[in-house]
Amino acid sequence: MDAPTVDPYELAATAAAELARRSGLVRHDAAVVLGSGWAAAADQLGDLVADTELGDLPGFPVPTVAGHRNLARSVTIGSLRVLVLGGRAHLFEGYPADTVVHGVRTALAAGCRTVILTNAAGGFNSDWPVGQPVLIRDQLNLTGASPVVGPPPPANEPSRFVDLTEVYSVRLREIARQVDPTLPEGVYAGVLGGAYETPAEIRMLQAIGAELVGMSTVLEAIAARHLGAEVLGVALITNAAAGMSDEPLKHSDVLDAARDATPRMVALLRGVLERL
Ligand code: 8IG
């Protein structure tokens, strides 16, 4: 394997500098990564300061997945400066881990100390209907990839051996439940994806302690913890996982479920951000 020609931490610093130049905000305080179907929330999260196309920032691929937007939006909620990333890169698109987490590293280089990761996920806890938002309590990284694999981080960054005892902040989950006391918590299995699971794979994931499954989030959460941010993960259950219902899995159903849940998602995200 060839060593990368650009250090990913340096690339994130370059992207953050360009974001500051284009947005006019020298720093941001919190970042929200919007997953599949959450993009509509970008329009309702705060007072617009600036829009920057992700493709105009160094190191960002243009999002290709339906339901994602080519947008880094800077908004304010009171005095809080929030960076809303309208799209993300996935391993299943063929990107390496460093590219998948580039948005999160850029947000941290821009000053963010809080990272809210949202996603759409398949659920296999029968208490959770489609449209149910779930706080991620913990994760299983089953992708076989990690953002801290590769050349060691530069000397000014933390060691790769990051403590993952509390990936998803207890404090931020409590704040989320102040906003919506009915929110359940679950363990998210992050897989390489591309295809959805087989019923046998879902039974395996159940057996090893997961309750929801998706193709994102886990590497970004590791990267954010590595660089010291506090992380909140919110999954929207947009489909029953394979073998859990008689319905075939379709990406269009995922987007429909997310659209219907948008008002609740916006209220949750705004409520959390207002309380930071
Ligand atoms: I939305 O059922 C969504 N993303 N792996 N499995 C996996 N990813 C998903 C699923 C699902 N639903």
Image (spheres, rainbow, N blue to C red):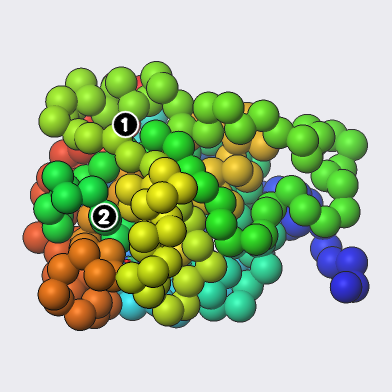
Ligand 1's quadrant: bottom left
Q: Residue at x 37, y 52 (%)?
A: 206
Q: Inspect the image, locate mark 2, and give the three-letter code of the amino acid beneath it.
A: Phe
Q: CA distance from mark 2 to mark 1?
A: 29 Å
Residue indicated by mark 1: 273
Q: Is residue 72 visible?
A: no
Is disc 2 in contact with disc 1, using a CB cutoff of under 8 Å? no
97 or 28, nearer to the observer: 97
142 or 273, nearer to the observer: 142
**In the figure, is residue 15 to the left or right of 75?**
right
- Badge 1 crowding class, 10 Å Cα cut-off, few under 14, some 14 to 19, many 20 or more, is many
Task: Give the foreground label among 2 and 1.
Answer: 2
Q: Is residue 98 visible?
A: yes
Q: Inspect the image, locate mark 1, and give the three-letter code of the amino acid beneath it.
A: Leu
207 or 124, nearer to the observer: 207
**In the figure, is residue 254 to the left or right of 187?**
left
Q: Secondary structure at mark 1?
A: helix
**Image vertical order of residue 244 relative to residue 137, above or below:** below
Lower sequence index among marks 2 and 1 = 2
**In the figure, is residue 219 to the left or right of 231?**
right
Q: Secondary structure at mark 2?
A: loop
Residue 73 position within the rendered picture, expressed as x and y whole percent measured from the top left: 39, 54
Residue 237 position within the rendered picture, expressed as x and y whole percent measured from the top left: 23, 55
Which of the 4 image quadrants contains residue 262? bottom left
Residue indicated by mark 2: 124
Q: Which mark is residue 84?
A: none
**In the figure, is residue 99 to the left or right of 81?**
right
Location of the N terminus (image quadrant): bottom right
Residue 47 position within the rendered picture, expressed as x and y whole percent measured from the top left: 27, 43
